[in-house]
Each structure stands twice: as C-alpha cells, then as structure tokens.
Amino acid sequence: MGEGDKKKHLLLEILRSLGEAKLARIQEEVEARRLSEPEKYEALTGCNLQDLLIEMAEEGLVERIFPEWGAPVYRVRENRT
Amino acid sequence: MLPEKLREDFPALKRLRNGKPVIYLDSACMSLKPRQVIEAVREYYELYPACGGRGRSQHWFAREVKEATERAREEVARFINATPEEIVWTKNTTEAINLVARSFRLERGDVVLTSDREHNSNLVPWLELERTRGIRHEVVPAREDETFDVERLKEMLSPKVKLVSVVHVSNLDGYALPVEEIVEVAHDYGARVLLDAAQSVPHRSVDVSRLEADFLAFSVHKMLGPSLGVLYGREEALRELSPFIAGGDTVSDSYYERAIFLPPPHRFEAGLQDYAAQIGAAAAVRYLTRVGMRRIEEHERRLTQYLSKKLSAIEEVRFVGVRDARLRSGIVSFRLERHGRSLVAPSDVAELLDRHYNIMLRSGDHCLHAWFNARGIGASGSVRASLYLYNTREECDLLVEGIERIVEVEG
C-alpha cells in the first residue's frame, strides 16, 4: 500500500469509528491515536487532514456535507458499488 | 496609524468578490505588491529584458541590466546598513539558510544550536547535516511563557558549538527573540550566529552593523517585492564559506583542472539570475524607506494590540505562542477551544472566513511542525493573522466579527 493510500485507510478507520464528525473532532482523534499508537498512525503526522478529506470526498470515499453556514461534516460513504 | 491612502498603491486591494473588498491577513507568507514594484518589474521585461552579470554580454540592454542590478544590491544593502559586497541574492530565505548550512565549515561532532520555534527552513537543514555529516543539532528549550531562555542558551554553549542559528521574529506569533544578547553570548564562545530574519526585515528597522550577527537571511517577497531571497554575511564570515552552487558567474577563470572563484558575493550567485526580481527588490526597499520602517513597525504594533484585545474578549479564543500579548508584533495566532477541546478546526475557520468575509489568512502548522507536535496539536495547528502596513482597524473588526459568528454557529 502506498503512503497516500495508507493515510486514507487510517483516516477511513478513524472516521468510521466517529460516525459523523467535523474536522476539529477528527483532528483531535488523530492526535490522540498518534500519541497512543505512534507506530500505527505515524503516516498521519504532518498531514493536512482537510486536504486529504477533500481528496477523499472527490474520490467518493467520504461525504463532505455543508450546512447552510458553518464547517462541513464528514462521514464515510459506505454504499459504494 | 499609517494613512489609508497608501492602500491605493496596492492593486490587489481593489478587487471585489461578491461585492465585498479583499482583507489580506497573510503577509507573513507573501506580501501584496505596490504598483511601484510592479512597474519596476514590468519596465525590465518591456525595455531591457537581457542578461546581466559579470563577463557576459556587453551590449546596450545588458549594460542597463548590470547597472540596475548593481544599484539594486546597493539599495538593499543600505536598507539594512550593510555594504553591497555583503549581499548575496538567493531564491528565498530557505535557500539562504541552506547556503550557510552547506558551505559553513562544520565537522562531525560540531554543534549547531537553534531555538525551539524554528521554521522548517531553519530546522530541517541542520537535521540533514546531522544525518549526513554527523554534526549535532541541539534545541534551546523556551521558558514556560514561550519566551527565549538566554540563561539556558548560556548553559548549552561550549567550544563545540560552531553556529547558533535562530529566528529573529517568529512566524508563529511575531515574538522577537533577544538577538542582541544571543549574538553577544554566542560570540563569547567563538560561535557564529545566523539569524532567520524573514519576519523582521520586512517589518522593523534592522541594522546589521548594530546587531553584529554573522549571517542574516530574509525574503524580498515578504516585503512588497518579487520572489527573491537575500543572504547578508559579514565580509569575514562570507569569506569562510565555500562555494554553494558552482557555475557561470562564480569564477574569474577556469581550466580543465581547476577554477578560480570570485570573492563574495559573486562566488555564490551561479548562472543567470532573476534580474527583474532584483530590480523589483530595489523598488520595494525604496517604497518601505519612503513610508518609514519605524512608522510601519509602530502601525503593526498598534494593530496587533488592537486585534489581540478584541479577540481576547471572545471566550473561545486561545492565543498560541508567547503568553504576553505585548510581545506579539504583526502576527496573531490562535485556536478556538472550549473546555480545553478544539471547537472549530483552524482550517475550517480559515475556509469560513475566506468564503463569507473575503478574509485571507493562514491555518495549520505554518512550517513549525516540530513546535506544534511537541505541544500535541500538530494535527490542527492554529489560525494565523499576519498584518502589514496596508491593514486597518476596520479589517481587524471584520475578522473579529467573523470569529464571533463562527463561534456562535459552531458553538
């Protein structure tokens, strides 16, 4: 698995565990996991999570839902064919 | 405060989106350009777009380029009270620091000291030398209030320390390190001093003869000019450096077996240069000099205090960097938190401000990953507003209004 795919795989795992979340919550979870399991989550170090999530949304891996005014919400798109 | 009339010199400020004006608060990354600089660059491309340098073409255009670029070197030198021979053109501050890192005599076991708040450009080169040449890079930890600890520096200095390389003004929070004291104690141990002045030279009067640092690096594109870097080196210190990138214009003569390098600064400027940028740099320093560096510094200091005070009235704003607001100048970094947890991600704050208010600022780690990682907030970083001579109180008010709205909606 390439570095980019690994990051996406880890982020999907985190997002799946959170259900639906805004970026602040995702960042907090990434930080906590990097501290508790540094080896596993090292790939997410220094990673621009917003850019990565936008890329994943463009690839159809996650949904990026915009409220009328406010920060977007992210959730895993599970029903891909 | 500086007169708002000077804003008319900046064409980018005249743009509108959705009927709203531009609010540019990202000058720590790249400053806007006044028409005087744009005009100088345009003139080069329109009237004499030829090569300059030594020993190249001798025709009419080339002579004009040579004269204009030599004048530019003189004007930039005068701006920091240096001599033209002490000014080396580089691509940017990062390249200037790398020039010193690669060319300064450092051997296995030699120590380079930095602060704990260095931009990657003044951290990664030393980590690379640690890996490839066996030097030791040591970090001087800050005090609890995030200010530089000179006493700790004194404890860490030894004859093994060959270079102390620190940021002058931090791109995190605008905090100015006590560089005069740092230079003095480093010199007491025979160490050379390199200052990353990317955030100081554009915003305050810097006099290298008073600072007495051996090297000083800064970027013209952060001070109203085109993309260009400058390495200042005291004549004696520059002579100690070996050539960085070798090639045309760095030598006076060459044979199949050897080459004779020119003295500094030319030995460090290989190949054709960005002559338009050098000419634009002169226009930029003329503009800044005309406005007055002390007035610019005072304008930014007042705006920073004004913005800090207004933001501190919002309960969810947590400032990042030095605790004492009076020590911040030109840069305000913060996070939105509630009960110790991030309320809105800094990059979401930046996106919302851009989308709804045309406010352009920066979010993330600001190339200070090590600093943020050491504090457990590496995944999110901070929101950073950086001010310059064209910013106003009204723009600060709109930023505060935007932050209040975000807190209201997201809270």
Image: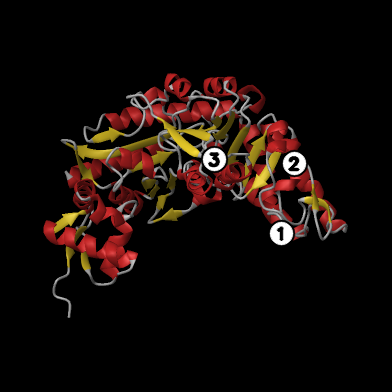
Q: Could you tell me which residue is drawn at 28 percent across and 39 percent down? A: B335
Counting residues from the start of the chain, the first of labels 1 and 3 encountered is: 1
Distance from Cα at disc 1 to Cα at disc 3: 47 Å
SS assignment at label 1: helix
Residue B341: x and y in percent read 18, 40
Q: Could you tell me which residue is drawn at 63 percent across and 44 percent down? A: B103
Q: Amino acid at mark 2?
A: Pro
Viewer-nearest residue: B74 or B369: B369
Residues indicated by labels 1 and 3 sit on the same polypeptide chain: yes
SS assignment at label 2: loop
Q: Is B299 drawn above or below residue B75 in the view shown?
A: above
Q: Is A57 drawn above or below residue B89 in the view shown?
A: below
Residue where numbered disc 1 is placed: B45
Counting residues from the start of the chain, the first of labels 2 and 3 encountered is: 3
Classed neighbour count for the residue bearing mark 2: other residues with Cα under 10 Å, few (<14), some (14–19), many (≥20):
many
Dividing the image into 4 quarters, which one contains the C terminus of chain B?
top left
Viewer-nearest residue: B159 or B36: B159
Residue where numbered disc 2 is placed: B264
Q: Is residue B379 visible?
A: yes
Instruction: Tell me the mark number nearer the camera, choosing from 2 and 3.
Output: 3
Viewer-nearest residue: B228 or B103: B103
Q: Are the residues tagged 1 and 3 within 8 Å (C-beta)?
A: no
Labelled disc at residue B108: 3
Q: Amino acid at mark 1?
A: Tyr
Labelled disc at residue A23: none
Counting residues from the start of the chain, the first of labels 1 and 2 encountered is: 1
